[in-house]
């Protein structure tokens, strides 16, 4: 990370000493704001919630079942036989183990799916930023590593507008146009 900032500073000082600073167009993107406010992020959260809600309900029901079994054993423990008490304790222990295993699997599956959805969103946001940068002629866009960014260089709202409008396809760059064969 330090290497990036040193390179950035060297480039900026190099450009400014060569008279290029006036032509350099910089932008800043607040990634946390985009991930919080983009409609695609909300859609991903809703998709995950819908996908995992049934399993979550089953886990809650299993927790209640274990709690009920423990309560019943505590209430009836003094009046039931030793063999019945041991059997109930074993059943509770087995249920707890199964519940813990199911919770761990749920958490792991949820994290995998969340990372998949988050990865798709990150790629879309990246493509949208690059498209906007090429279209508007930005030379450099920085993100989370910035310590301060004035409103003049903050393009977060522009990126959000594109994501909300669905216009997040990469725009062809000047290099792409010259590299493509002419017919």
Image (tube, rainbow, N blue to C red):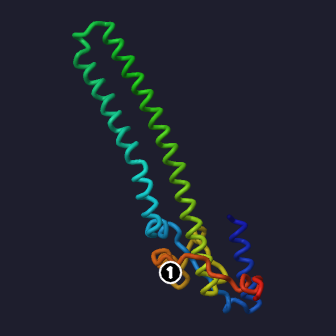
Residue occupying the point 39% across, 17% down: 90
The x, y position of residue 34, in whole percent, is 49, 70
Q: Between 130 and 165, which is closer to the camera in this rendering?
A: 165
Q: In the picture, residue 98 is in which quadrant?
A: top left
157 or 59, which lies in front? Answer: 59
Q: Is residue 40 left or right of residue 11?
A: left
Foreground of the two, 30 or 63: 63
For the view shown, which residue lies furthest in the front direction?
183
**Residue 79, percent from left and from top:** 22, 10
* Quarter occupied by residue 97: top left
Q: Which residue is mark 1?
A: 158
Name above or below for residue 74 compared with residue 62: above
Circle 1 crowding by C-alpha within 10 Å: few under 14, some 14–19, many from 20: some
- What x and y, as percent, mark residue 60? 34, 38
Q: Residue at 68%, 83% (x, y): give it.
A: 173
Residue visible at 52% across and 78% down in the picture: 167
Relative to 124, say whether 150 is above or below.
below
Can you say which quadrant of the picture contains the N terminus? bottom right
Q: Secondary structure at mark 1?
A: helix
In which quarter of the view is residue 137 placed? bottom right
Quadrant housing the C terminus: bottom right
Residue sitting at x 51%, y 45%:
109
């Amino acid at each position: 990370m330090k290497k990036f900032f040193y390179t950035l500073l060297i480039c900026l000082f190099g450009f400014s000493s060569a008279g290029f600073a006036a032509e350099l167009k910089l932008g800043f993107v607040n990634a946390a704001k985009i991930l919080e406010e983009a409609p695609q992020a909300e859609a991903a959260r809703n998709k995950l919630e819908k996908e995992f809600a049934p399993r979550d309900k089953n886990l809650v029901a299993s927790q209640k079942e274990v709690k009920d079994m423990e309560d019943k054993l505590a209430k009836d423990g003094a009046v039931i036989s030793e063999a019945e008490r041991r059997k109930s304790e074993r059943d509770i222990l087995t249920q707890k183990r199964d519940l813990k295993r199911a919770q761990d699997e749920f958490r792991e599956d949820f994290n995998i799916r969340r990372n998949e959805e988050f990865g798709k969103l990150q790629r879309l946001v990246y493509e949208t930023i690059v498209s906007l940068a090429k279209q508007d002629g930005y030379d450099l866009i920085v993100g989370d590593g910035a310590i301060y960014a004035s409103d003049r260089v903050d393009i977060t709202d522009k990126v959000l507008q594109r994501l909300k409008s669905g216009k997040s396809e990469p725009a062809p760059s000047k290099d792409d146009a010259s590299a493509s064969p002419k017919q």
